[in-house]
Image (cartoon, helix red, strand yellow):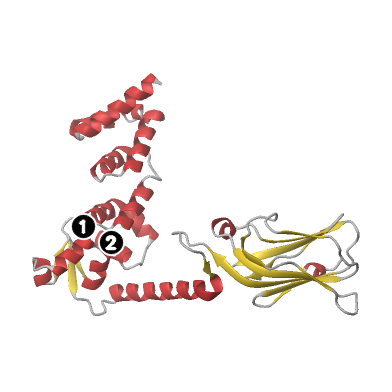
Amino acid sequence: MNDSAYRVETAPRLAQWRVDAFSSSSYRKSDPFRIGLWNWHLTVERNKHLLVKLYPEVSNLTREQPPIASFVIKLVSTSSPNRKTIVHPVIFDKQLKSNDDFVWAVENFFSGRFIVDVEFLDLKIASPSGGEPSSIWNSYNIEKQSAATALTCFSRMLSEGIHTDIIINATDGSIGAHRAVLATRSPVFQSMFSHNLKEKELSAVNISDMSFEACQAFLNYIYGDFKADEFLTHRLALLRAADKYDISDLKEACHESLSEDIDTKNVLERLQTAHLYRLPRLKSSCMRYLVSFSKIYEIHDDFNAFLQTADRELIAEIFQEVLAAWKT
């Protein structure tokens, strides 16, 4: 059979698959075809009934944001002169993840060649942050493009120093920034610029505990210009700044990242950091690494030195973990 037997013709919201020479007991799967954000497949299988399936191709996008589809699907005979048609009732807002999520069993089916015709009325995806699913055609692409454009503009405002009105002084350099952006992202900055404090009067903020590069990474994050390499390099400095200026999303991002690469060289520093900045997940991960996996014995000397300077409350928590492990 030639390749065209599996090809699906598409328009922006329409897909048609012409099925020829389909025997009384057989199965056929279409080539993938693109509608919306996903690749799709159609299958037909004839046994007692004709089974028609529509489903998205397996991918990370399908797993993370499966389509919520509204569509009309019908079978059109191309063998009969009057093009006999069988139409399935309209499907509304059905989530499709696997090849069993939509199965149409057609009992009184005609013989000969036919077309599987699918017209998508809408395709939606659920927002990762929750709320009602949104249509990819009505709002998703426009919203995505708008957000990307806005972030690009914010990045240029910072990198090109467009109409800056505040100076951020780090330990070894200064960066021009914008009060409105800083105040929007941080209640601490908002308070500074709303009251008659020296920062408002001098149009400058001194961040004396951050290097220029760390401060640049901090501002890049605030302005939406995230750079993975500088984030990883300056995580601890970014965590301190996020805590100091009450930027909860940055603090959580640092918390998550610091929990992902604990090893014997950094576990004690991470444990101290977790205790100081109230990061329960990081603290739990460090404790488990040290006690449950017995890494505490591999860094015996470093651990003894750590005990000489660590907070007493933290030391007590460590020994409680050790005692609990011995009991089990």
Q: Amino acid at mark 1?
A: Met
Q: Is residue 38 above or below residue 320?
A: below
Local crowd size for mark 1, using a 10 Å CA cut-off: few (<14), some (14–19), many (≥20): many
Q: Which residue is mark 2?
A: 218
**Residue at x 35%, y 24% (from the top left corner):** 324
Left or right of 306 in this view: 30: right
- For the image, the number of numbered tags is 2
Q: Point out the residue furthest to the front here.
A: 89
Q: Nearer the viewer, residue 216 or 149?
A: 149
Q: Secondary structure at mark 1?
A: loop
- Counting from the top left corner in percent of width and height, residue 39 is at 65, 65
Local crowd size for mark 2, using a 10 Å CA cut-off: few (<14), some (14–19), many (≥20): many
Give residue 45's mark: none
* Quarter of the N terminus within the rendering: bottom right
Q: Amino acid at mark 2?
A: Phe
* Residue 298 visible here: yes
Q: Which residue is mark 1?
A: 210
**Residue at x 88%, y 67% (from the top left corner):** 110
Q: Would you identify the image quadrant in which residue 207 lies?
A: bottom left
Q: For the residues marked 1 and 2, what is the alpha-carbon distance in whole angstroms?
A: 9 Å
Q: Is residue 79 above or below residue 327?
A: below
Q: Would you identify the image quadrant in which residue 191 lies?
A: bottom left
Pointers 1 and 2 in contact (C-beta within 8 Å):
yes
Q: Point out the residue furthest to the top here.
A: 327
Q: Nearer the viewer, residue 157 or 295?
A: 157
Q: Is residue 26 above or below residue 140?
A: above
Q: Nearer the viewer, mark 1 or mark 2?
A: 2
Q: Is residue 180 above or below residue 323?
A: below
Q: Disc 1 or 2, which lies upstream in sequence?
A: 1
Q: Secondary structure at mark 2?
A: helix
- Counting from the top left corner in percent of width and height, residue 219 is at 28, 65
